[in-house]
Amino acid sequence: MRSILGKTPHRLEKLDRRLVQSLSRVPGGGHDDFFRRLSAAANKGKLWFGIAAVMALFPGKTRRAALHGVLAQGVASAVTNLVFKTLLPRARPLPEHLPVFRFVHPQPSSSSMPSGHSASAAAFALGVGLVRPALGTALAPVAAGVAYSRVHTGAHWPSDVFFGSAIGAGAALVTRKWWPVRPPFPAVRRTPVGAAALPDGEGLGIAVNTLGGSYADETAEALQKVFPKAYIKEIAPDEDVAAGIEAVATRPGVVALGVWGGDGTVGTAAAAAVEHSLPLLVLPGGTLNHFARDAGTGTLKAAVEAAAKGEAARADIGHVSVERGLPDSPEKLELSMLNTASIGLYPNLVRRREQLQPALGKPLAGVVAMFRTFAAGTPSTLVVDGVRHKLWILYVGRGRYYPRDHAPLVRPVLDDGVLDLRMITADESFARLRLLWSVLTGTVATSRITHLREASRIRVEPGDTTMVLAVDGEVMPGVRAVEFSVKHGGLVYYSPQPEG
């Protein structure tokens, strides 16, 4: 065994020399100048940084792929130059091995083993490909060209390039643990149920919150045009929203309740719809329109078509029992939760993310918002189902949200019967440093500070003082305890049914 290992470097050197000799017999031409320029373009990663900068102009998966590629390249470069070039010193090819006119100038002076250019090229291309396979495929020939150029120009032996490429591929795969590729979201699934057809809005009562994010003076008039037979009530800024919605729901002749407003308004309307056994038509009129998006009525056209045909489905609705006020005179409130509730820094995080998203795109805006929020914030002490935690964020979703990490976006199923509990804890030592490091490296979803589970009932109490609770975007201070539960299939809502 020792004799075999001892002969391996010598055999590798002989193979390298044979390959370089074969290459030296290739006639010179324009390709020599091309590979010299390609090799020079990749110096210090300039080629890959340039490609990443162009990709970053396109939000979504393309920008995410660029960040993943740069991260993988950085790891590969550090491992190659700081570790292996020190451990594996090797002389580079000499002019006697290749024609002098092919050599790059100046020749590198560091160890030939392994090739840093090849490591960076493989890491970037594969890192991009893990997120955007089509782009990774397009970059593969460029990466291969850079790797080959290092042999063609006399900068490396073939085995240097092979080893460097292996390091780069390994770096891309390792960073996948830090920045895992999100699995595809499950298919949208509805539980269809019959509901009253509303041609031209006949039998429909619509409550319009004039404080809704997209409200304008012509909103009610525009709705009356698409629902000419509907009753429309505008809720004035000084009017109680719940009372206004109740007036619409109890109006004689109303067989379905429509709502135009933000998440808080829609949540209030959902509670009224359940109480009066009315189907709910959610119109895209708020700032965020989370439920309208999940219900398939994210556009006014989709909502009109579903209402006209009587197409509807069932959704769960969350029940929130809140205890607040002074200990000797507690106040108890019963609320409905249509989307989410949170305690801690999550409201600030969402607000910052929404502000940054138009300029940075959602993924990068989420990272920047998290860093800013957690750098300045402090954790809260909470008792969750009897277990005491220090928490940066406690988030409860009504239904299973995707992706399954710290940035929930959509719910493909609205009647799965679960509460989606997500906590980012500060229980561990060096809590803030751990958190900021996970934000910087994109590892929050896989970090030990992130805890995800599902439940049908959750109770939360403050550890030492009162807490601030946000339910469907509505903030409530002075809370002493809160309990979440699920009413399965309690809400009927209008939703376009898939064709076929």
Image (cartoon, rainbow, N blue to C red):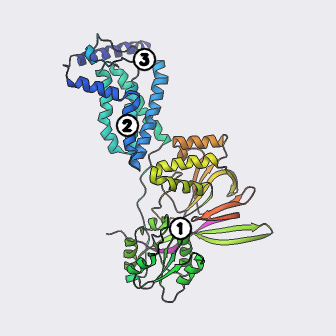
Which amino acid does the dot numbered 3 rest on? Answer: Ser
Mark 1 or mark 2, whichever is nearer to me: 2
Task: Tell me residue 440's x, y (percent).
Answer: 54, 41
Relative to 173, 488 lies left or right: right
Task: Tell me residue 8's x, y (percent).
Answer: 38, 15
Q: Mark 1 to mark 2: distance in Å?
A: 41 Å
Q: Which residue is mark 3?
A: 111
The residue at 59%/78% (across/down) is 239
Which amino acid does the dot numbered 2 rest on? Answer: Gly
Q: Secondary structure at mark 1?
A: helix
Q: Which quarter of the rendered picture does the N terminus lie within? A: top left
Q: Secondary structure at mark 3?
A: loop
Locate residue 93: give its quadrant: top left
Q: Which residues are magenta?
A: 483-500
Crowding around mark 3 (Cα neighbors within 10 Å: few <14, some 14 to 19, many 20+) is some
Q: Which residue is mark 1?
A: 263
Residue at the bottom extreme, as displayed: 252
Q: Secondary structure at mark 2?
A: helix
- How many numbered marks appear? 3
Q: Is 14 drawn above or below residue 59 in the view shown?
A: above
